[in-house]
Structures are given as C-alpha cells and as structure tokens.
Image: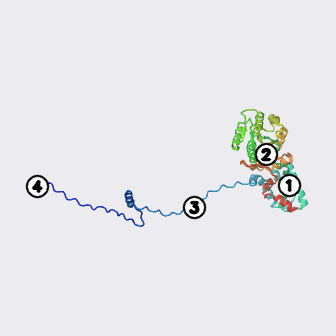
Amino acid sequence: MFGFLKKKPKPDPVPVKPAEVPSDEVRDDESPVDAGEADTLQVADAAPAPVEAADEPVLPVPALPQPAARPSWGERLKAGLARTRQQLGGGLANLFGRRKIDEDLLEELETTLLMADCGVEATQHLLDELRRRWKRDHLETADQLQAALAEGLLSILKPLEAPLDISGHSPFIIMIAGVNGSGKTTSIGKLAKYFQAQGKSVLLAAGDTFRAAAREQLATWGERNNVTVISQTGGDAAAVIFDAINAARARGIDVVLADTAGRLPTQLNLMEEIAKVRRVIAKAHPGGPHEVLLVLDANIGQNALTQVKAFDAAIGVTGLVVTKLDGTAKGGVVAAIARQAPKPLRFIGVGEGIDDLQPFAAREFVDALFSTTPGSLADRKDGAA
C-alpha cells in the first residue's frame, strides 16, 4: 500500500543527433578554412546580408561666387566725378539739346560753368574760346560745341599735370599741410601706400601734435602699411619732424612724409608755427623740404583759392592734393585753381579706398567729366583737322 511512495524510474534520455561536421573537401571556388576560423564563419553566415543602399544622384557642387573685379582708376574717376558731371554735363545736355548755338545759349552756359565752381576767370576764358571757335569753325551742332568746350577745359588744366618726381634726393622730404577736415592725414596714409607700390621705403612723421586723434590715425595707417611712425605725445611739431629726418637718414629711408597741424589761413600765429616747421626741416636736411603739398577739400569750392594763396605765402606751396571729389558738385574748382592760383596738381582723390588717390592726368579728368572715352578728345581734334 505504500507503493505510491516508490520513485518512478527516469525515462531514458533521447539520443541527440550529432551535428554534421563539414567534410574536408573544398569546392573549386572556395579556399580552405582552418578550425580556428570555423566559428567566425558560422556567425558571419548567420548574419543577415547587408542591404545595399540605392544609388543617389550626385548633386553638382555650386561654384563659389567670384569676387567682383575692382573697377579701374578711370572707372572710379568717372564715378567720383558724377556729381560735378551732373551739374556741368547735365546742364550742358539741357542747353545743347533744345536749340541752336547763339549768344543766349552761351550766356546760359556761363551760368552752368559758374554753378560748377569753375570761377569767373576760367569761365570767361572758356566762353571767349568757344566764341572764337564758333565763328572760326562754323560750329552748328551741340556735339561740336561740347567737344570744343572739352578741348578748352583740357587746355586750361594741362599745365597742372606735373607728376611728382622723388628721384633727386634721399631721403625725399615731403611736408604736408592743410586745414582740419581736408583729408590731410588720410592722404598721408594713401601716399605712403602709393610710394611703397613704387618700391620706395617710407617713414611717417606725426607732426600734428595738437590733435591726439591725428597721431592715432597716422599710427593706424603706419600699421596698415607696415611703415614706421615717429611721434611724441604733446611734443613740439618741429622737434618730431627733426627726429624723423635723422631717423630716416640713419635707416636709409627713401621718402619722409611729414604731417603738420591743421589750421585756418586766418590764424596768423599758427601759420607762423608751420613756417617754423619748414625752417627746421631746412636745417635738418639742407635743401629740404623737397616738396610742400597742400591738401584741399573739393567741397569748399572757391575757398580753395584763398587757402592756396595763404599757405603759399607762409610755406611756399609746391604742389596740391585735391580730395573728396566724389562728394561734391564743385569739381570745377580745379579749373579755377588753374587760372587764378596755378600750382602743380600732384594727386586727386575720389574715394575712401587706399588706392583712390592717384596722380592727376588732365585728359583722364576731362574725359571722366564729360563721360567720353579715353583719347576721344584727341580723336575729335585729329578728325576736325
């Protein structure tokens, strides 16, 4: 009766069929595998085959935009004289386009020239020349009269074209003067770049000791052009320039650009100070300064004549730099200077760029003023002959 306490016998184990061992035979398209690689191959065989990604179309790489080419000097000059051209050329277009040449037209032309600040003397000279050409050459059309006006203006401006030659002295000392706000210090920085482009070494003298901002501005230009700047805080302007000349001689510098404090021609005591600077330069280097540049803001129009005469009396101006022609309709002042205070116009400026200050060329100036192509005046003259 205690049979239920007896243990049931365990069932016999089910025999397990051994796994088939792959034969040592190798197919012709397979390489033999050793025992150490068998497990790896079994796992790899068990892994699902990777799904190949569908070929995606290759999009073309967009070309990088090329930087716009910088306009040529002639193009920049034309753009810079746009306001004067609008004042002068626009008025001429209105005059020439509506009637034949007569005395009434010439009188209105006189008003147009005066509005462009050509000055009374230059305007009268141009009108006298036009009247002579009108009668001698029997001018009839507006194009003929405008061509005659352009040639007359070219004849006035041509004597001002005298590029600065710095080959005669080493160092060549350039003293730069002008009223505050004329663009004097900025012009010095641009001149430094201009002379460097000619392969000359340059040194700057911060002679404007009255205005701290001028020294800082000149130092910035020096860093930009990698040029040494000699300066002192609150020192005497003549002493600063004296030290700069000695430093230039010791270092074999080609060009010294000496800044001076801005002043008005009516400030007689300050005009005497700048005359003293010129005398000190002459003592530091016999024959110096070799060039005395006066920087003029074209926006002041006829007042430029007063400045030229006053600075010339104090320091003997030998050349002019006319700046900011791109910001005024008074570019005709160049003609007024040519007739009433003729000084070589060494450079003109028509923009903020470091290379927007270039030597003055009368033909380029007139061509830009009348929107003609370079050489057109000569072509017209030859054709008329």
Q: Earlier in the sequence, mark 2 or mark 1?
A: 1
In this rendering, the label closer to the viewer, 2 or 1: 2
Crowding around mark 4 (Cα neighbors within 10 Å: few <14, some 14 to 19, many 20+) is few
User: Mark 2 or mark 4: which is in front?
Assistant: 4
Rate crowding at label 1 as few (under 14), some (14 to 19) or many (20 or more) other CA atoms within 10 Å: some
Identify the mark nearer the N-term, 4 or 1. Answer: 4
Residue ranking furthest to the top = 235
Please identify the quadrant where the N terminus is shown: bottom left
Q: Earlier in the sequence, mark 4 or mark 3?
A: 4
In three-dimensional space, the C-alpha distance between marks 4 and 3, rounded to whole angstroms, equals: 90 Å
Q: Nearer the viewer, mark 1 or mark 3?
A: 3
Marks 3 and 2: CB-CB under 8 Å? no
Judge the density around disc 2: few (<14), some (14-19), many (≥20) Cα neighbours within 10 Å: many
Q: Which residue is mark 1?
A: 152
Upstream in sequence: badge 1 or badge 3 = 3
Q: Is residue 12 visible?
A: yes
- For badge 3, the amino acid type reads Pro
Q: State the mark number for residue 321.
A: 2
Residue 61 place in picture, x, y as percent: 58, 59
Q: Are marks 4 and 3 in contact (CB under 8 Å)?
A: no
Q: Which residue is mark 4?
A: 3
> In what element is the residue under mark 2?
strand
Residue 76: mark: none
**Separation (CA) of disc 3 from disc 2:** 52 Å
Badges 1 and 3: C-beta atoms under 8 Å apart? no
Residue 238 or residue 112, whichever sits in front: 238
**Within the image, what quadrant is residue 274 found in?**
top right
The Cα–Cα distance between marks 2 and 4, rounded to whole angstroms, is 133 Å
Tell which of 50 and 205 is nearer to you.
50
Q: State yes or no: discs 2 and 4 in contact (Cβ < 8 Å).
A: no
